[in-house]
Image (cartoon, rainbow, N blue to C red):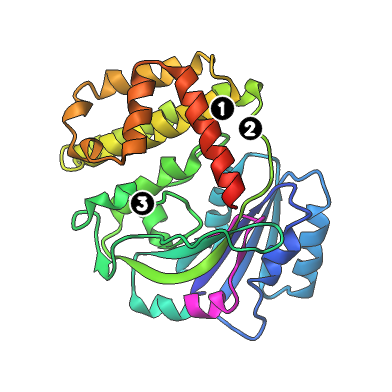
Amino acid sequence: MTKLSIVIPVYNVEKYLAKCLDSIIYPQIPDYEIIIINDGSTDSSPEIAEKYAQKYPSLIKLVSTPNGGLGHARTEGLAIASGEYIQFIDSDDYLAENAVPEILESLKLGYDMAIFDFVPVTESGRRLSYETGCKRDGMFSLEEYPELLFEYLSAWNKIYKKSLFTDNSITYPDRIWFEDFYTTPKLYAAAEKITHIGKPWYNYLQRPGSILRNKNLARNLEIIQVCDEVLGYYKSHGLYEKYSRQLEYTVLYNELITSTTRVNLGDKKSPVQAELLDYFLRNFPDYKSNPYINSMAPKLKLLMHLITHKHYGSVNLIMKLNNRIKKKNS
């Protein structure tokens, strides 16, 4: 069996794809494969991927599908992956030098999931920060470290045993935002041996762009479906009571604070904000007694207060000021 399958969903990334692929190609190293899922690209990405597949036919599998979104492409890659382990890479990002051989060496640890560090970078390659993927070291489980639910939910700073997906019927959703939030908490619950590897194997590209256009703001409501899915999974597996406080905080941070501020920056009068708040209050009426919420940083407490009291103009002012400070310091 191949040891590692690296799955790369591709959609209209002609500017970035070659750099991504160059960072993971080691023809002299056996025991891994690269699976490129062309998710209905309309630019020159398919031609770029085809050139690499022709050059490295024993290493690269290229599959084209109609556009179905990031989650769909990942699931397609999982279905054909022959590796014991899976790694996902977003096609505008790239790995650090020697990451692939180091990752293959790390598989000897026998983990179910490994979480590693990453570096946000600009298009010129300038490092913006160093992000620790997990605050816990050593081998552990969710039961031993329930605060794992507060760590980065991203799919791409992790390596997974494929059986976590196949044995537990876990997949990524089609055509829905927040696909990592939909899936990662389930994988945390399924994994018995999780480890943090303190190496910055992943370069996370910060692409320039504007605030979401108003017509897309309503898509933030898809996080409600995602929260229902995650909470339902934990309930159906008899885990909800054990992790109720951690899940409550995770929903607060991702569904309420993060999504509300994103919508607010697009349109501070958007009714989507009130719908997000209503969902949270309806599902977590006793949130004020949550110790994790009570120990939040002052900035988050302030945002929480403003959001729950619907002071959206003040939220907008704080977020714009925060973005100016970030831009000045970057």
Up-down relation of residue 232 to residue 199 (above or below): above
In the picture of the structure, the residue carrying the numbered disc 3 is: 151
Asked if the magenta segment contains residue 90, the reply would be yes
The picture places residue 183, in percent across and down from the top left corner, at 42, 45
Question: Dot 1 surroundings within 10 Å: few (below 14), some, or many (20 or more)?
Answer: many
Real-space CA distance between mark 2 and mark 1, rounded to the nearest whole angstrom: 7 Å
Q: Is mark 3 on a helix, strand or loop?
A: loop
Locate residue 315, reporting x and y percent: 46, 25
> Of label 2 and label 3, which has the lower sequence position?
3
Magenta span includes 303: no
Q: Name the residue under label 1.
A: 265
Foreground residue among 290 and 193:
290
Q: Can you tell which mark lies on residue 211?
A: 2
Identify which amino acid the numbered label 2 is placed on.
Ile
Segment colored magenta: 88-103
SS of the residue under disc 1: helix
